[in-house]
Image (cartoon, rainbow, N blue to C red):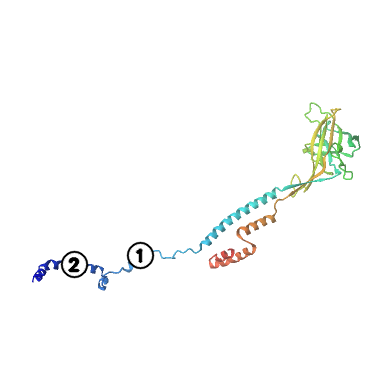
Amino acid sequence: MSQEGSIQSQDPSSRISVNNNEETTNDLKLKSTPQSPALADTITPKSDHENNSIASNSIPKNKYKIPITIPEIVTSIGWVLAIVFCIWYVVNASGEFQTSQNNPTTALSIVEKVPLELPAVTICNWNGYYECDFCDLTLKTATRVVDGNVVEFEIPYEYKEIEQNGLYRCYVFNNFSDQVMASNASGYGGVISLFFEVPSVPEERDARFGLQVSFHEIGTVPNVFAETNFAVANVDNYFVLTKIVTTRLKPSIENPNLTDTRWESILSLVELTQRDDNTVVISFTYNTLTEHNNAEMYTSSIEGLLGEIAGILGVMMGIDILKMLRGCLQVPYSFKHKSIRGIWDTFN
């Protein structure tokens, strides 16, 4: 009885707590239980318009794929750099070729010749007046050195009047091809001296006193009007000669002949012990018994230029004639197929 009474006395409070615990447990079970099919049917699906708008805002994969690969891009950059370098090289090589054609270089060779032929010598008065009573000249004597001794000798000559912007009275020596004089010694040992008597110039006249000397090829007439070798009185006008033969590639206005022979001279003045105001002494000899040969030549030729161009194209781009031919044959197909893939494959 006592136990039953105690149980009954506890029923109200315990009954309430048990009920509360059961409700809490049921709520937790409800929250963890998945939705039933009936509840899922109550969720409204998205409309087609909403789905299309979402699809339009998203970028599909592989839609903007690049038509060439990364190695092909790198190869294209290499082609551009190679083409630019080849253009620069070809332009530079062409400029050097043009410069070589316009300004050829000269090769010098020195040939020893014993005996060495002397040039023709034309000696004229300074003043080219048509009417002049003091423009004449007269050969007095000629000397040469033989075994260290100065001796007089007969030298062949001709008297000639040359008209070049004036009238010049001249003596021409060694101008006969069948009587060519030659020198067997250089310097003083081969010197030839010519003594001329020249009339005095009136003091009231503005005129020069002396002679002019031209060294030229045998059988030719020198340009006495443009002569720059002059001789004066009271001294020995000592000309030291060097023979120069020039072979040109192209004729010019000043030098119409491809082969030209001239004699460069260096003038030395030697004082005379016996002076005569009307005597002009002209001496000439060779510096050395050698002939200087100057030959013009091109440093580059058209064959060399084409070889350089072909070499740079082959090294930088691997282009040869057969590859160019195959590439040209692919051009019509490129227009037909609207693609340069065939040309690309040919050169790569």
Place residue 310 in its image quadrant.
bottom right
Q: Taking the image as drawn, is residue 344 in sight?
A: yes
Is 229 above or below relative to 316? above
Residue holding disc 1: 54
For disc 2, the neighbor class at 10 Å (few under 14, some 14 to 19, many from 20) is: few
Looking at the picture, which amino acid does disc 1 mark? Ile
At numbered mark 2, what does the secondary structure look like: helix, strand or loop?
helix
Residue closest to the far front? 2
Residue at the extreme top: 203
Q: Is residue 80 above or below residue 144?
A: below
In the rendered image, is residue 127 in sight? no
Q: Is residue 141 left or right of residue 226?
A: right
Question: Mark 2 or 1, which is nearer the eye?
Answer: 2
Labels 2 and 1: the sequence-earlier one? 2
Q: Residue at x 66, y 50 (%)?
A: 96
Report the residue at 11% width, 67% height from top: 10
On screen, residue 52 versus residue 310, left or right, reads: left
Query: What amino acid is found at the position of numbered circle 2 in the picture?
Result: Asn
Residue 202 in the image: x percent, y percent?
Answer: 81, 27
Q: Nearer the viewer, residue 319 or 210?
A: 319
Label 1 CA crowd tier, 10 Å (few <14, some 14–19, many 20+): few
- Residue 254, x across and y down, in percent: 75, 44
Q: Position of residue 173 (x, y in %)?
A: 86, 39
**Mark number for residue 21?**
2
Tell me the distance, in whole angstroms, between the alpha carbons under discs 2 and 1.
Answer: 48 Å
Marks 1 and 2: in contact by CB < 8 Å?
A: no
Expressed as whole percent of the image width and height from the top left, the position of residue 111 reads 81, 46
Q: In the drawing, what numbered circle is on residue 235?
A: none
Residue extending farthest to the bottom is 37
| Rendering quarter of residue 169 | top right
Q: Quadrant of the C terminus?
A: bottom right
Q: In the rendered image, which quarter is residue 211 located in?
A: top right
